Amino acid sequence: MDRIKGYLQNNKLAQAILICVYVLTTSLSLYLLQESVIAFLLVLFSLYLLYLTNFKNSIKWISAIFILTILVPYVSSQGTAFQSYMDVSTLVGIYVAMALGLNIVVGLAGLLDLGFIAFFAIGAYTYAIFSTNQVTHFIHTNFFPLTGNSFWLFILIGGIVAVIAGILLGIPVLRVKGDYLAIVTLGFGEIIRIVFNNLDRPINFTNGAQGISGIPSPTIFGYVISDSSQFYYVVLAILGIVILAVTRLENSKLGRSWKAVRENEIAAQSMGVHLVRTKLLAFAIGASFSGMMGVVFSAKQMFIDPTSFTMLQSITILVMVILGGMGSVPGVILGAALVTILNLQVLTEVTNYLNQLTLDGVISIPTALSPAKMQRFIFGMVLILVAIFRPQGLLPAQNKKVKKEDLVESSIEEHKQTISI
Amino acid sequence: MNDVIQSLPQVLIDGFILGAVYAIVALGYTMVYGILELINFAHGEIFMSGAFIGTAFLFVFSGLGLFHSLPALLILIIVLVLTSVLTGFIGMGIERVAYRPLRKAPKLITLITAIGISFLLQDIVRFITELKRGNYILTGPSLFNSQHSIKTHSILSSFGNAQIKSASIIILVVAVIMMITLDFFINKTKWGMAMRAVAQDRETASLMSVNVNKVISLTFFLGSALGGATGVLFAVQYNTIDPYIGFILGLKAFTAAVLGGIGNIRGAMVGGFLIGILEMFASANLSTITSGVLGSEYKDVFAFAILIIVLIFKPEGIFGKSVAEKV
Amino acid sequence: MLKISNLTKKFGGLTAVCDVNIDIEAGSITAIIGPNGAGKTTFFNMITGVYTPTSGEFMFQNESLVGLKPHAVSRKGIARTFQNIRLFSSMTALENVMVGMHQHLHYSVLSTLLHLPTFKKKEKMAMKKAYKWLEYVGLEELYNEEARCLSYGAQRRLEIARALATEPKILLLDEPAAGMNPKETRDLTNLIYQMRDDLNLTIVLIEHDMKLVMEISEYLFVLDHGEKIAEGKPVEIRNNPKVIEAYLGKSAVTTA
């Protein structure tokens, strides 16, 4: 086994051949067997295999982009399941972006935020309120409601509103001991849900438990992005930007401050790192990602209500980060993909399968134990097992290895400059 | 304003009862935090498990016809003892299996485990209940339903009369007995002193030949037993329970513990009563005070706001002292 | 350079440091010694902002720093290492040092996100500079190693490199030689001299290794039970009966 691994690690041609063969086989199977969820998942799995290879990063990225933007939509488009595949992929994209945001807070800065969904809700409701008739309940001008054109602007606005909320919450809480942050954020998540659930009286801001419907789809240069497959590209593009932003932030002074604060607060302070400001930045930036994706979510779903923003969702995002690997971008992407697919596809598929078996009289699984309902149990087990046995997650965070050439002076000019040491 | 004063006795009575529940649950949080500096997220679920286990016992005893032969109060006491022992062991087991292996790990990891256990318990109770009853919402046999009237109107004419269920009286009495017993145990017995010692300085306590692991196990047992017993009382008072009652109640109980000064036993008790009374007050009067803008649905928000305010102005709580970390 | 007057720290009923007066001259190598529990680290913690003094004053270059938080104290030019090593374990040696450079690295979040030329240039310079600090303490080969994987001696040196990266005027070393063998201690001694001479630093160290202390210090302060019981040149302190008593007990004095 290790011999095979060793051989593969050194032979890029072999890797390339294997991956191409894999992609071809799985794509072909999906093309022919449109209803096969397994084939679909296997095609997506090729991305993970791509990650494991030794190719240059640019090649990996180009291949990944090809697979995601051209291959997957094409081969899954032959049957009736197309929209549902695109739907799942779009949601995976949204949750991956959210999880990357939480990764900054929990993974990089070490702040346990258990109410992350609150910022998501804030973003979602901001767009929903101002782009539908909801706004006419409390502001009466011709300017509102806004159209789907404003979607792009609202991504920004949603992010900003979420940041403001994050800062307001963070300022009192981040000054005290970190243990309290978990409870406070948990409470905050609940509070936002309760508030949105009840804010239909005396002035109808959020339409309470009934939710807001008729949220317009985004339009770009007059073209309406109407169905799941088109929205898929929107989310993919946004996800690309998010990954870029998160990676850049991590490998900078700010990223190092976050990690320093996570590892040892007192040492970090003694090196000049402003503790509260650093934590607040992590909290606010994480909140902004959540808020922005909330806007995207509400535009995609076209209907939102408070039941989409519960503690279960906050913990779901947390499971994505923990399972994938705290602080690790590829890990979190994997974790988010796994959990979302688990939630949306695997659990329902398994439930259907078991129901079928029950109907056929093969085995009898009582409905109380149906997998689709066992989410909390599964998430609880995942959290406990990962925490005890593999706290670094599936794809642990890895330090950026610096190349020697970047560090050592070659020219005499630069040598003269740094001679001050 | 008149409404506020008139309802005050009722609010106070209800607040005390709710506060008693919060107080004892808060004790569980504060004891564990004092000794391990860990927020035991699963504690709310222990409380909830107690409610379900207690109700299950009541059903069993009712099915056995015991309610005809024995006084209901005696049955309740038996159920209380049985349930609290069971939940005590559950709590102890959780510490042994999930928290002890992680004692050297960063705090974040342990908190995550606690959340995992919390979720696990919620779902286990849910599917067991759903399996047995077809639904995860459970309604227990109603006991002690007679109402009594307290003639507060005669004290001050602007007060209305207050009503109190027999169940509530029993809860109050049992709760107070539990709190006094715990206080006595902590302050006057050898094991209680050991607990205080380990909470203050684990290393030194172990050097004084205190078996730290045993003390920690005992702390979890006590806190969980009390929490479970409170769950039974809660079930008796409100009759209908579901697997998710532990969550919000746990949050509020923790707020109470923080309010009283985390790690401080008496503080937790005071904090619990305070939060209970404040919440009842808000529930009864929020719409009157805010002229209908905010209704009683916001009473949970109220408790949360208290938490934030305490953290801003006095994070060490009413009775706590700020402790500097050893560098 | 550093003038400490009547500095006191009480923790509830316990007085850890009581009414201590210490003057540190610029460019000197000063040692603070005393038996365990004498309050030396508490003293360090007060002058680096980790603890707030209960009373008293300390002036750094004629400016009062009482009440400043640690990051502000660091920016004034006071750097330190820790008794129990406090490195950023999961970060590489290079990154650890780069955190030390935090206060001298200026670029905005925006330029980070857009990878503006300012960002790229300053990051590159920071990496090069951090490498130079690693070279200075002899750790240049380990720049990509995770801090937690380093040997004990290497970790201590990394802490020093990180502290130096803050470009301080005064360096506080808390038991830098703890757990070191004689060779390592000799290297440390040389390093301390080098730092004082090359970098124009004032050095204050807390140490238990008497050989190192006597060899390297120009001036000594002795603390016991939170109070200053003696100060002076090494030769004076060595024969000071109060010091001997503090370390070895009363009977040792009579036999000295």
Image (cartoon, rainbow, N blue to C red):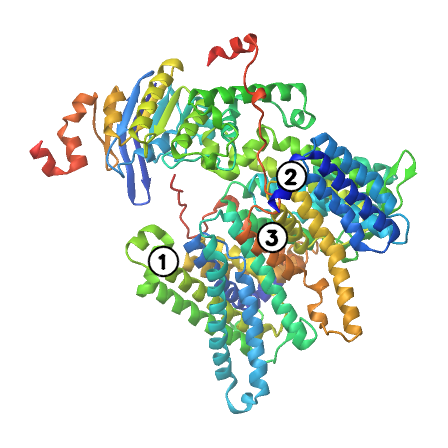
Please determine whether, in this image, residue B171 is positioned above or below residue C172: below
Q: Amino acid at mark 1?
A: Val
Q: Are marks 1 and 2 in contact (CB under 8 Å)?
A: no
Please determine whether, in this image, residue C95 is positioned above or below residue A386: above
Q: Which residue is mark 1?
A: B212
**Direction left: furthest residue:** C254
Q: Amino acid at mark 3?
A: Gly
Left or right placement of residue B1 versus residue B80 in this view:
right
Q: Is residue C88 visible?
A: yes
- Chain under label 2? A
Please determine whether, in this image, residue A390 is positioned above or below residue C74: below
Question: Looking at the rendered structure, which numbered label has been put on residue B31?
Answer: none
Q: What residue is shown at x 77% (from left), y 50% (from top)?
A: A41
Cα separation between marks 3 and 2: 53 Å
Q: Secondary structure at mark 1?
A: helix
Mark closer to the observer (1, 2): 2
Cα separation between marks 3 and 1: 33 Å
Q: Secondary structure at mark 3?
A: helix
Q: How many marks?
A: 3
Give the image location of residue B194, x and y in percent: 33, 60
Give the image location of residue C142, x and y in percent: 48, 28
- Chain under label 3? A
Q: Quadrant of the N terminus of chain C?
A: top left
Q: What residue is shown at x 66% (from left), y 54% (from top)?
A: B290
Q: What residue is shown at x 23% (from left), y 29% (from top)?
A: C210
Q: Report crowding for label 3: few under 14, some 14 to 19, many 20 or more residues within 10 A (C-alpha).
A: many
Q: Which residue is mark 3?
A: A187
Question: Looking at the rendered structure, which numbered label has been put on residue A7?
Answer: 2
Cα separation between marks 1 and 2: 52 Å
Give the image location of residue C209, x and y in percent: 26, 30
Q: Residue C16 sits in which quadrant?
A: top left
Q: What residue is shown at x 41% (from left), y 34% (from top)?
A: C151
